[in-house]
Amino acid sequence: MGERPTFDADLGHYFASLRAAAGFASQRQAALLARKRGIQVSYQQLQRLEAGKTKAPDVSLLRSLSRLYGIGFEVLLSELWRRQYEVSVEPTAIKRDKVVPRPPVVIRPQEAAVIELMRRLPAAKQEHLLRLVRDFIESHSPLARAKEGA
């Protein structure tokens, strides 16, 4: 079996910066503390994530990372969507364990509706909705449209 491809090195750097901002010097240190706190994050998951080898992180992993790094799940999810899909949702900057608002950006009504719906749903339904949104975005991306036209 060959080496896994790198999907998004920039996203990997983002997750590495979150770990560093939370005060963890290494992936191993973060994974050890996660285990002690009962948070489901392994060293291998952190390693793949920070190397950009994870194409679409699972919602449960994102929830675990938000707990481990002390940032809001919505903040992590909105930044992930912004980086992966160029969808602007409540933009925030993360510094240590503080969330610092950036200047306001126009959020389209569809995006605001998705954010509000995500906040109101239980975790299992959030995961299902996230899969639906990912599928929709991927099927309506310029690359998907180009494949259909070919």
Image (cartoon, grey):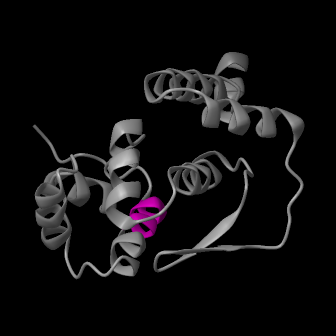
Picture quarter containing residue 113? top right
* Residue 10 magenta: yes
104 w.r.t. 148: above or below: below
In depth, the one of 64 and 107 nearer the eye is 64
Give left or right: position of 83 versus 16.
right
Q: Is residue 52 visible?
A: no
Magenta stretch secondary structure, dominant: helix
Residue at 54 percent of width and 52 percent of height: 80
Give left or right: position of 103 versus 147.
right
x then y, percent, for residue 59 = 41, 37
Residue at 52 percent of width and 28 percent of height: 126
22 w.r.t. 77: above or below: below
In depth, the one of 16 and 124 nearer the eye is 124
In depth, the one of 51 and 31 nearer the eye is 31
x then y, percent, for residue 49 = 31, 55
Magenta stretch, residue numbers? 9-15
Give left or right: position of 51 versus 28.
right
Q: Quadrant of the N terminus?
A: top left
Q: Quadrant of the C terminus?
A: top right
x then y, percent, for residue 138 = 60, 29
Picture quarter containing residue 28? bottom left
Residue at 62 percent of width and 37 percent of height: 119
- Please tell me how many numbered marks the rendered image carries: 0
Residue at 62 percent of width and 51 percent of height: 78
Give left or right: position of 5 versus 41.
right
x then y, percent, for residue 40 = 21, 46
Q: Is residue 89 visible?
A: yes
* Residue 44 magenta: no
In depth, the one of 79 and 145 nearer the eye is 79
